[in-house]
Structure formats: C-alpha cells, structure tokens
Image (cartoon, coloured by chain):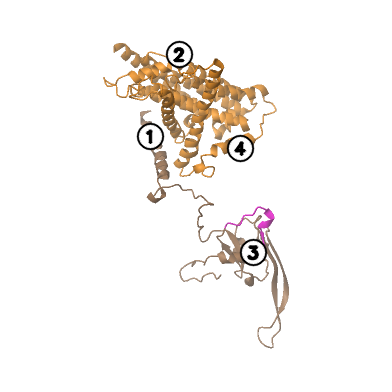
Amino acid sequence: MVGVVVPYWGQSIFRAVGVAVAVLIPAGTAVYLYLFKMVSFMQSRLGPMEAGPYGSMQLFAEVGKFLQKEDLHPDNADRFIFKAAIFVVFLTVFLVYLAVPFGPFAVFADYSTGIFFALAVSSVSVLGILMAGWSSANKYSLMGGLRAAGQLIAYELPMILAVMGVVIQASTLNMQGIVAAQKNGEIFGWGGIGSPYVLTQFVAFVIFLIAAQAELTQTPFDMPIAESELVAGYMTEYSGFRFLLFFIAEFASAGAFAALAATLFLGGWALPGVPLDASYMNVIGPIVLFTKMLVLMGIIFFVRFTYPRFREDQLQRFAWKFLIPIALINIMVTACLKVAF
Amino acid sequence: MAKLVPGVLKGLGVTFKELAHTVTPKKMGGGAATVQYPHEKEAPPLRARGVIALREVNCTVCMLCARSCPDWCIYIEGHKEKAPPRRPGGKPRTVSALDRFDIDYALCMYCGICVEVCPFDALFWSPEYEYSEPHIADLLHDKDKLGEWMETVPEAPELEAGADKKKK
C-alpha cells in the first residue's frame, strides 16, 4: 500500500476518520448544493446568501443553531430507546460507506461480498426508524415509523433485485470486482470507456434510483414524514442535536446510495485510460467517485423537488406490482444473455 | 402507466426551466424574483400604505380619526385659542390648537380609516416603510415626526380624468 508500516490502531483511527469524512462531505455538499441552492433556483429564489460568499457558510450556522436548542424528550417516551434510535440510523450510513471502494487500495473494508454487505446493513436503518417511531409515545411518530417500515421493506426488494442484474453481469459480489469488470468490459469490441453498467443494465439503474429515492424517503415517496399529515413522522419528537443527526443521516444516506449506484452502474472510481492498479488513483479515485455521486444526488434531489407525494396505497402498489416484476424480468433477461454469450 | 411518462418528464422540464432561468444573469433576462432587501431596495408603489403623515395646519382637532380608529392608536389633545378677527372690527375667533397628535405604530393596523375619515386633508399615506425601532415604545410617532413624513408623501395621482387632485 504505502511505504510506511501503519500499526493496526493507526489504521483503525485512519478508517474511523476516513468514514466520518466520507459521510459528512457528501452530506454537506448535497445540503448546500441541492437543498439550499438548487431548490431555491427552481422556485426563483436565491437561497441563503448572507453567511459567507453565496451563503456557503450557512451549514455551519445551521449546525450552530441546532446545537443551541434544548434536547427534549416526551414524558412517556421510552427514554433509552428514544435516544438510541438515532444512533442506529446513523451507524448504518457509516457501515454502507465501509464497503464502498474509493481507489485501488483506498477502501475501508474490501469484503468479497461487499455489495451484499452494503445492502444488508442499509436495511438496518428500518430498525432505528421503528425504534424512533415506537419510543416517542406519539401517534404521529408511530404512524410515521410504521409507514417507513412498510415502505423501506417494500422498496428494499426491487433495489436488491436490480443489483442482482449487475452482480450476474459482473459475476462477482465484490465491489472492487464490479469496478474492474466495468473497467475491463468492452462495448461491441470497443474498450475505450470500458463498459459502465448504466448502458447494459439501464433498467436496473432506473429501478435502483427509484428504490433509493424511496429508501431515503425523498419526496415522491415521503409518506413516512408527510408533514401535512404526520408533522414530521418518526422525527416529530426529536429536537436540537438529535434532530440534526436525523437530518445528517438523511443526506448522508443519500450520499451512500449515490456512492453505491455510482460504483455499480457508472464505473466507480475508475477513469478510462488509466490502469486499474495505478497508485495515484488512490488520490484521484475519491474525486472521480465524488463527482459521480454528485451527479446522481443531483438526479435524486431534482426528482425530489419536482414531484408531489404518492399516496400510501399507490406507493405500495408501485413497488409490488410494477418495480418488482420489471426487476425480475431484468434478472431473467440478464441471466439468459449471460449464459448465451 | 405508459400514459404517465410524458407528464412525468414534463414536470422535470418545468423545474429545470425555472432553474435555468434563475441561473441566467440578470442582464440576459434571467435572475431570481428575490430582491435582496438591505443591499438593494424595492421602490414601493405610489399608493403603498407605509406610514401616515400629518399636515398639522390642516388639523382642527375634530377627533374624527381618533374615534374611528379600530385600534385606538391615535392620541389627540388640543385646546381652544382666541385668534384675531378675520375682518377689522369683527369678533375674535376661536380656533383649536393641537397640543399632541401621536400615532402608535405598534398598534396601528394600517387600515387607513383615519386617512379616509379626515374631513380637512390633514392625514396622508406615505409609501415610506423603513421606520422600525429596536424599542417598541419608539414606534409612537409624535406630531413633529408625523409632520416630517409629509416630505415623503408623493404627489397624488388624478383619481379620474378631470377630477380635482387631493391637495397635499
């Protein structure tokens, strides 16, 4: 890896700091670039302009504001679970980033079943949300938590089935293997840009993005936190720092799913024309991946700021009767073609 | 489901068009609808209800404005004075002099009834709006301050062709 031998505890610290950076930078960028600016422009506003040049320091002002607020909990709340719930949600975001490769060696944990691990831990956040909804002792929170659980489980399936197509085509569950397969692939004998799976697995890509939108409870699928019906769903009773953590977790997991999608469909950290094992890709790779993540997060938030909300039954019907059959057909077609060629 | 697709794409187009319009520089016909208030100021319309100005010489202390004010935010005190007769040899006249005319803008709801009800054209609307105060008591404008607002009262537009203008 590098010339110096780093002791195990040093590596652990490096990993912890690295994951924290990997979680916070995409989340912060998404909040400023999309939540503050893009949505404002779409509504013919300017967004924050006063804190720093073009409001770029607004994030720090917001964090400062949240930190000043009182840390409340309802009298009837199950205190321990109420306080633990947010950390369960937050932890899953960190764990998803663990499996995402940023360069040939810049990877926190190179599991041989990386994508399986990432999708498995990302569904743990349902537990945190249910804990938050149940322990708040509030009917809005409870309804929001139940809706979130139903929705997250329903959209987990098309997401996993969409990823299956990629896994079949790449013949590996390893994230580095999927990156390499896309890098070394060829489009009808032409290997100029490799073969990003967004071309061959376009259906899976669209299903993955829609399912990610639902997993993040972003707007067309924001039934669990529908503010006109449920105040803020499972987040209703949270205030101050705990609400801030929920908020960061929402945007950090948007970054996490964008990182997964970028790795699975857009070729990950690899650049065309650069050998896969070049050591300088450890520095350039994260930037490449970050750029791809920004594009994908842009799509996610573009959709979020455009569409109104699905009704609960429409939302379930869309997952079970439309996305899952299409994902299954996609798997079958991919498998047949894989065997045929 | 297939029927939905064009509408779905159209929605994305609408937001994207607005985004592009806002990002385009002002010189090229784009820009946001926002006016960045402390840095750039918007000229209020001529008849905006900003602040009420008082022309003291027209006031006869008739109290109509104070009585008709729904918020009771106008405070008037006056006294009678003897004035020299109009013609030589006449009786000295009795005129009302204004001692106090205060409007409490912390209470005022800008309904404009006082301006409407004044029979002697002593009250006027001014579009001036920048008179916020750090202390609420300072929103009580006395008659000197209300008189100063007269400078900001715009020339009244003609109400209809041939009608008399409201005199300032």
Closer mark to the observer between disc 4 and disc 1: 4
Report x, y in % for residue B40.
50, 53
- Asked whether residue B141 is drawn in magenta, I would say yes
Image quadrant containing the C terminus of chain B: bottom right
Color of chain B here?
A: brown
Q: Nearer the viewer, residue A15 or A314?
A: A15
Amino acid type, label 4: Lys
Amino acid type, label 1: Leu
- Asked whether residue B139 is drawn in magenta, I would say yes
**Measuring 40% from the left and 37% from the top, which residue is drawn there?**
B11
Of the two numbered discs 2 and 4 on the same chain, state the one appearing first in sequence.
4
Q: Magenta segment range?
A: B129-144
Q: Which chain is orange?
A: A
Residue that numbered label 3 is attached to: B145
Amino acid type, label 2: Thr
User: Which element carries disc 3, helix, strand or loop?
Assistant: helix
Residue that numbered label 4 is attached to: A65
Q: Quadrant of residue B82?
A: bottom right
Q: Quadrant of residue A297?
A: top left
Same subunit, labels 2 and 4: the answer reads yes
- Say which mark, if any, is on residue B9: 1
Question: CA–CA distance between discs 2 and 4?
Answer: 41 Å
Reply above or below: B98 against A128: below
Closer mark to the observer between disc 3 and disc 1: 3
Res A224 seen here: no
